[in-house]
Amino acid sequence: MSVLHPDILTHDEEGALPVRLVGRGVPLSGSEAVWARAHDFTGKAGQLLSLPGGGGVLGGAVFGIGDRFDPASTRGLAARLPAGLWRLEGVSDDQATRAAQAFALGAYRFDRYKARPATGPRLSVPLSVDIEVLSRIASACALAREMIDTPAADMGPLQIETIAREIAEAHGASLMVTTGEALLEENYPAVHAVGRAATEARAPRVIEINWNLDRTDLPLVALVGKGVVFDTGGLDLKTAAGMRNMKKDMGGAAHALALGRLVMQAGLAVRLVVLVAAVENAVSADAFRPGDILNSRKGLTIEIGNTDAEGRLVLADVLTRASEHAPDLTLDFATLTGAARIALGPELPPLYTDDEALAADLLAAASAVGDPVWRMPLWPGYVAALDTEIADVKNDSSAWAQAGSVTAALFLQKFAPTTGAWAHMDIFAWNPRARPGWPEGGEAQAMRACFEMLRGRYAG
Ligand code: BES
Ligand code: MN
Ligand code: ZN
């Protein structure tokens, strides 16, 4: 997979045109002020105005930042500036680093299906900016976004496996893949049940990357992701509108893999396990059914109330697998519920954890890097909404509880490792509205926050 234009950020300055960040009130003078007035440029956040140079060439630009410097607005700069090399004027070193990170994130375009991909701007940054570090993070986000944006026909279980293999090989990690009928022999019954309706070339699989596992002196981190390559809802079929964007239902897997790559690239002092369940929730004569009772790797039986609550089923088995490594920390990412969007909207992913220290570290990291999460409760009173008379647990919580993102998290909690801390993020992984730098489509959410938290705890 292509990831990110490799030199979107550069220390090279030759020929770079200046772009000045200006606040509201516009401290411009002379002919620039006249030009700005003629174009209704007020310094409002996100406004871009090209400035003429001599002889009809482009001389530079001014970019509005509104009332204060917010690095997120620099994402819009990458989307609005004309192609060419630019340098920021009027920013401190610290602002330059944060602006450069946002610029690299804002430069993402999903163009693999375009005959003529557009070329965008590049940014010349001062030597104080660590391009390598920023590019890795932007590339991780680009990888997750590109995997999400890629249609399900071209991002099936095998393609996810291939990406996992490339990541593992690049860092001397080992890869284990359990596919199709072998899922039954190796005791992943829920993954098999959800994925078995897919055509053979798109057979369900559990993908596991192990890195550094012989370093038993180091803490073990497990990253777990929901990789439903397309969610039709199964026999409880979704509506057309509900199905339209379900190519993104492997977003959790994309996040776990991209974050795993970041951890290995940074050489964090941890043992790492990345676990992904890659399945298609398809419809066929062999599909699992409402009313079926599945076994799980943990041995808990699960009554199927709704085949559209499939994510928690596959996660149950891979969370159990994660617990077999006795992790000190487990993070899972999943586009798990529509209810998460109803609770918090598409831009603020619910975070669930009972570990106070982990919650504090994650929330601090999230605000430090501008990648928000919002803590939600693992409210024990609602566990009863998962009770059923005829199995150990059911996959569709009782209607009295509502709070669908909470009850889904409580379901996962029954399977999550208990040797260390566990956090679950119910991500939307998608921008439903286009803003400059935030094109409609796949989005990495909570991943930079998690990396910042991990870096803070485990930087070598
Ligand atoms: N992948 C969906 C959740 C989803 C839907 C995430 C839309 C983001 C946007 C998940 O598998 C699902 O269908 N969940 C159901 C659960 C319900 C049947 C208990 C839901 O949220 O409606
Ligand atoms: Mn579903
Ligand atoms: Zn789903």
Image (spheres, rainbow, N blue to C red):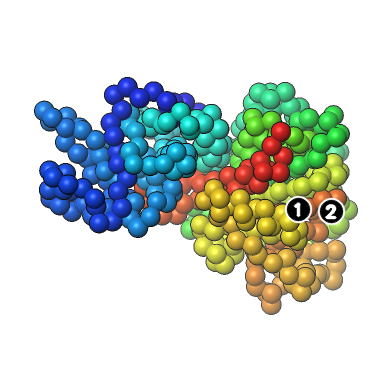
Q: Write the residue at 76% across / 27% down.
A: 174
Disc 2 residue type (three-letter) = Thr
- With respect to residue 386, does 451 lie above or below? above
- Where is residue 188 shown, x and y percent of the image? 81, 44
What quarter of the picture does the C terminus occupy?
A: top right
Q: Is the residue under label 1 in contact with that under label 2 (CB below 8 Å)?
A: yes
Q: Residues within 10 Å of mark 2 (few under 14, many from 20)?
A: some
- With respect to residue 39, does 78 lie above or below? above
- Where is residue 92 shown, x and y percent of the image? 41, 41
Q: Is residue 103 left or right of residue 449?
A: left
Looking at this view, is 301 or 78 the one in front?
78
Q: Is residue 405 left or right of residue 25?
A: right
Q: Write the residue at 24% across / 50% down.
A: 27
Would you say the beta carbon of the disc 2 residue lies within 8 angstroms of ligand 1?
A: no
- Where is residue 450 shown, x and y percent of the image? 64, 47
Q: Which of the labelled discs sits on residue 192, or is there none?
A: none
Q: Give the structural element (helix, strand or loop) at label 2.
A: loop
Q: Which of the labelled discs sits on residue 418, or is there none?
A: 2
Looking at this view, is 193 or 25 the one in front?
25
**Quarter of the image where one finds residue 173:** top right
Figure disc tally: 2
Residue that numbered label 1 is attached to: 422
Disc 1 residue type (three-letter) = Trp
- Where is residue 185 shown, x and y percent of the image? 86, 38
